[in-house]
Image (tube, helix red, strand yellow):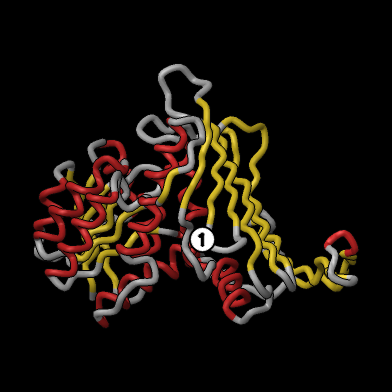
Amino acid sequence: MIGVGVIGYGYWGPNLVRNFAETPGARVVAVSDLRQERLRLAHSRYPGIKVTTVHEELIMDSQVDAVVIATPVSTHYELALTALRAGKHVLLEKPLTASSDQAKHLIEEALRRNLVLMVDHTFVYTGAVRKIRELITQGELGDIYYYDSVRINLGLFQHDVNVIWDLAVHDLAIMDYVLPLQPKAVSATGMSHICGSPENIAYMTLFFDGQVIGHIHVNWLAPVKLRSTLIGGSRKMILYDDLEPSEKIKVYDRGVMVDMNGESIYQMLIGYRTGDMWAPRLDHTEALRTEAGHFVECIEGARRPLTDGEAGLRVVRILESATESMKAQGRLVRI
């Protein structure tokens, strides 16, 4: 039985505690938070757990084998490093760290101590995203042309990170998992409309080798909530709508056909192919439940997680480059 301690019982912490409490092979031992009212809430829901405002007490508890961290990204590095040095496995809320140097240090520390370091890229554990990866891996889409996503809503405004680090990190994690290649450069633009706050709207364009391009639009200041992604290929295309209650993925057998008439490009004929649309059956298990189980299995079997420290590092590098580009009003930055 893996004893789990959760640091941070704010927005995401309760979901983590609930899922680990219901995961076979895991037992929630303790919860830490700086706010007494949050600890009282945690204890009322789970009377058997220990609660403390001192995270060091949780980390050093001999019954805690793994530490789950759901705190602001600026605190991730120090908390995770302390936990790893205490011999604890670590699961960090996204993004992994505030810098790639911090991420690399945590990876090295976990490797040196034979500990599991995992990042909470939640969408990777959804049935929808796993199905997308399966379809791409099997060649259903043909050659990948583009990844185009919109992730917007009204709030929640963050004070310590901009909208890229808050929302775009989801799409970067999905891209990292489903696409067979990594972006080489990024251009990003953004703007803050709230005085003293980081950018609340941003547009990112990612450039890959070949003819693949990615685009991500994120916004905290939109009147509606949208979570949609288009992935285009030479054979088929995918529409992924995370807000769709049942048919989250739709696969379209549509595209263009190019007929070169002779040798002149001016005689090129473009035809349109319109085939069927189908919605594959998906696993609707809660993503966090799957993720919690995977974390426990990786600890018990000394396995490498799907979203390990290296995956977190790749995403943080893109976030850093995009932030640098945004400060330079969209200048292309190599990743």
Vertical relation: 330 (above or below) 248: above
Query: Which residue is pictured at 23% across the width and 57% down the height?
Result: 104
Q: Position of residue 186 (x, y in %)?
A: 49, 47
Q: Is residue 279 left or right of residue 272?
A: left
Q: Amino acid at mark 1?
A: Ile
Using the rendered image of the protein, determine whether residue 243 is visible from the camera's viewpoint.
Answer: yes
Q: Secondary structure at mark 1?
A: helix
* Observer-nearest of 54 and 329: 329
Q: Position of residue 217 (x, y in %)?
A: 59, 42
Estimate how packed mark 1 is, as few (under 14), some (14 to 19) or many (20 or more) residues with alpha carbons within 10 Å. many
Q: Quadrant of residue 68?
A: bottom left
Q: What residue sits right under mark 1 in the picture?
A: 174
Vertical relation: 279 (above or below) 230: below
Q: Is residue 201 left or right of residue 315?
A: right
Query: Which residue is pictured at 9% across the width and 64% down the height?
Result: 62
Q: Position of residue 228 (x, y in %)?
A: 66, 52
* Observer-nearest of 330 and 282: 330
Q: Is residue 26 left or right of residue 235?
A: left
Say which quadrant the N terminus sits in.
bottom left
